[in-house]
Image: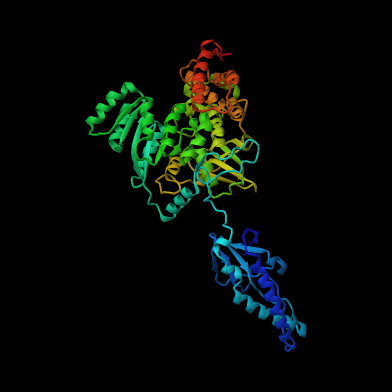
Amino acid sequence: MSYQTIPTSRCNEAPSNNTRLVVTALLAMTVGTCAGLVMNHATVPATSLYTAPTIARTTTMSAHGAAVRSPMLRTPAQPIVSAAQANDQLVYKDNQFAIPMYSMAPQHRQTTSWASMFLGSALITAVVGLAMKLSIQKAAPASLQQIRVSLEPSSIAMATVAGVRPGEIQGAAAVNSLEANELAVKEMMEGLSFKKKVTLLGSTGSIGTQTLDIVETCPQHYSIVGLAAGANVDLLVEQCLKFKPQIVAIRDESKLAELKERLAAGGLDCPVVGGEEGIVECAKFGDADTVVTGIVGCAGLLPTIAAIEAGKDIALANKETLISAGPVILPLLKKHGVKMLPADSEHSALFQSLQGGPPDGLSKIILTASGGAFRDWDAKDLRKVTVEDALKHPNWSMGAKITIDSATLMNKGLEVIEAHYLFGKGYDDIDVVIHPQSIIHSMVEYNDTSVIAQLGWPDMRLPLVYSMSWPHRIKMPYERLDFVKVGQLTFKAPDTDKYPCLSLAYRAGRRAGTMPCALNAANEQAVELFRQKKIHYLDIPKVIEAVMDDHEKDWNGEPVLQDILDIDAWARTHAVKLYEEGRFNNDYSQ
């Protein structure tokens, strides 16, 4: 068994400990020398220090700085440090630091009076040393430097970066305090006894229905406070009668009266509100612990802000909110002391891979992408793309807008910007790779070149349940990953000529300020024009680029909320204006 040696500079020992030991050893050697004079014919084994002694007694320090006594170690001995080195090293084993004391093993035999003297001195030194118990053992825990563990305040609960490289940002999503982390870990260690009250925005969409599947599967852990939807009255009524929320909201005010009537007929007596204001009211209502933001697009911005200001943690499935308004959202998270936990697969994978990692050890973020509906198409064949083609994702079951974003790879570009705001890395340190199997959901590379990844079947419920249950790991009745069934995992670089939207996203992210907002709004409008068959699939990046170019003259590097709202509205209107001016002819038949 081998040991890893760690310099004792990691412990704040008082200088007097070494001094006392040296003085005592010198006195003991003097007495031992005298004793050795009368032992002229003794047979003496030579001495050597071992980090894995045949018989050794050690003093250990736990991760909390408390000194404890370890049992005898009986393992094969391998000399790897000298006696001189021993005074400046600790041995690390089984998550504890061990200070080697004394070890003796025969190397050769010698019968001389000098050897006798050394034997006497060694024996007496050992006795005195043991009696002292190496005075470091008696040191108060306060005198020892606390070992760095994952309870540090950080971005997205427990991961952050030093922010020393160009493009990095300090305090990315600095979402909770040391005290909050300590409480969370304490709860985790005490067992799965947690109960969370959840408000769900976008309950009738893909994210919403999968979130309610989790709530229904784990009623001992979750209950519903509020449900908000767009216009699907039938499904919303069904959800309300099953989960009994305390407030219900619908964005389409023309459906409000019908919703109220049907809920009353079903015996549900609670506030029912409509319009944008109703969604905001639902987001901040009551005593919900967590708000799951499943609203598509920038429409989720104001409700998310309302939830943050009400002190509710955010399970972020609506990436557009952070992309468009990162400079506004990050300070609000810090101000109100709430957590923003990623609920999409890629950023949840990054979050999980960063748990317990050294805060300044993150080197690179690697986002994986399936490649979307056209990953196996030649670029020249994209002229033939129809709306129906773009809505056929090979791996994931998602909403229409995000499925088209996956086909253009804009979804991955938006995730690059989101990762920047969540984890603080500069854009040069955020990579994208095509991974057709969608088994590895993303990876992180550390400074020592180690890469840690999170794997699982492509099932959106996995990141959702982690964002709602962190720091717990609860048992779910989902299919277990079978590596034999998977067979192989492959990767390739994205083709930027085939996927120009990815390059546009990197451009917007590096420009920062209001440019990501313009990018996101232009993309949303371009996708809508494509779904209406007013523009061709290949026109989507052209619309976005034109809007970004025209936004340069009004670009704002330090926007406030109103700036974000203004640019979002302008970019959508401008995209439609460009279409109406005939900038995009929707003719790729040649």
Decide if residue 436 is on the left or right side of residue 42.
left
The residue positioned 48% from the left and 29% from the top of the image is: 402
Give the percent coordinates (x, y) of residue 355. Answer: 53, 48
Give the percent coordinates (x, y) of residue 580. Answer: 51, 11
Give the percent coordinates (x, y) of residue 82. Answer: 72, 67
Between 408 and 379, the residue placed more toward the observer is 408
Examine the rendering and report whether any part of residue 242 can be seen: yes
463 above or below 192? Answer: above
As drawn, the residue found furthest toward the top would be 581
Decide if residue 313 is on the left or right side of residue 155.
left
157 above or below 148? Answer: above
Examine the rendering and report whether any part of residue 94 can be seen: no
Between 119 and 375, the residue placed more toward the observer is 119
The residue positioned 44% from the left and 54% from the top of the image is: 186
294 above or below 338? Answer: above
Give the percent coordinates (x, y) of residue 577. Answer: 51, 13
The quadrant in which residue 495 appears is top right
The quadrant in which residue 226 appears is top left
Task: State which quarter of the image contains the C terminus.
Answer: top right
* Colouring of the image: rainbow
Between 304 and 504, the residue placed more toward the observer is 304
31 above or below 556? Answer: below
